[in-house]
Amino acid sequence: MTVSLLNNGASANPPATGGSITGNSASATSDMFTKLLVAQIKNQDPLSPSDPAQFVQQLTQLSQTESLQNLSSLTSANASVLQSMQVLALGAQVGSDVMAETGTLTTDGSTKVHAQTTLSATSSSTRVVLTGIDGAKHNVNLGVAAAGTVPFTIDPTALGLPAGTYTMTVETSTKENPPVDLQGRLNSVRLSSAGSVVLNIGNIGEVAPTAITAFNGKSTASATQSSL
């Protein structure tokens, strides 16, 4: 299992190009403003010259514009650095078991999946409903569930779940719709063509980093494979 960060050339070129465009744009704006200011001074009415304070004000506005452009460029560069650091940090977790909030489950039809939901109030009748692409529903009955974290296990064999992808919803007696966190292995980390970070998690598929709710560490099997 490896971390895909796209190729170095692709990741390095965009910031440089962006910086060049911003720099050229700022320089062009400055040159244009200077030419307009000189033309304005040359063509003013000698009998009714413009107030020098107006020129000072215009120069101040130009300086402020350039400062904002530089700040925007710096912010973009910092965002790129932070994103790279996030990818590297998440890459170090590849092979770890994580919990991620999701509304779908992808199963091989046999492997048990640990999950949990969080209730804001006690529910006297609670169940997790898994719906296949054929519309068939499969229920995981949780019975009476107290407020707080409610762990449960999805057993495809016991439920008769064929391999495939299922949507998940939690039905409670209080009519709330709490989220579901599934446990899966972090398989890879990559950057999408749009520049966003994408995680591939077993039992779930591809999600954004914000979907992660917990890092549970590497299992013994994972650690053994990593050392080989």
Image: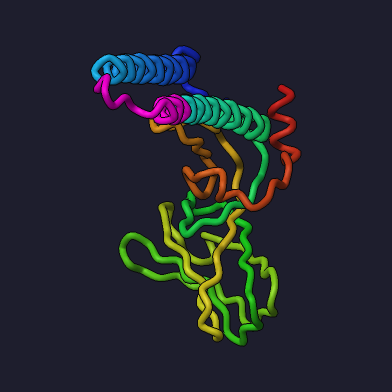
Task: Name above or below for residue 181 compared with residue 13.
Answer: below
- Near-viewer residue (80 or 67): 67
Q: State the extent of the magenta-drawn residues as a range.
A: 44-61
Q: Quadrant of the C terminus?
A: top right
Image x and y of residue 70, in percent: 50, 24
Residue furthest out toward the front? 47
> Residue 193 colored magenta?
no
Which quadrant: the N terminus? top right
Where residue 92 sits in the image (x, y, percent)? 67, 30
Question: In percent of the image, x 28 and y 27: which residue is there?
Answer: 48
Name the one closer to the observer, 66 or 134.
66
x, y (%) of residue 81? 59, 26
Which residue is found at the position 67% from the left and 35% from the top?
93
Q: Residue at x 33, y 19 (%)?
A: 37
Compared with residue 210, is residue 91 higher up or lower down, i.e. above or below? above
In the image, taking residue 206 as reference, residue 181 lies left or right, namely: right
Type of colouring:
rainbow
Residue 177 seen in the current view = yes
Which quarter of the figure has residue 59?
top left
- Quarter of the rendering containing residue 62: top left
Front residue of this view, candidates 49 and 99: 49
* Image quadrant in which you'd find residue 173: bottom right
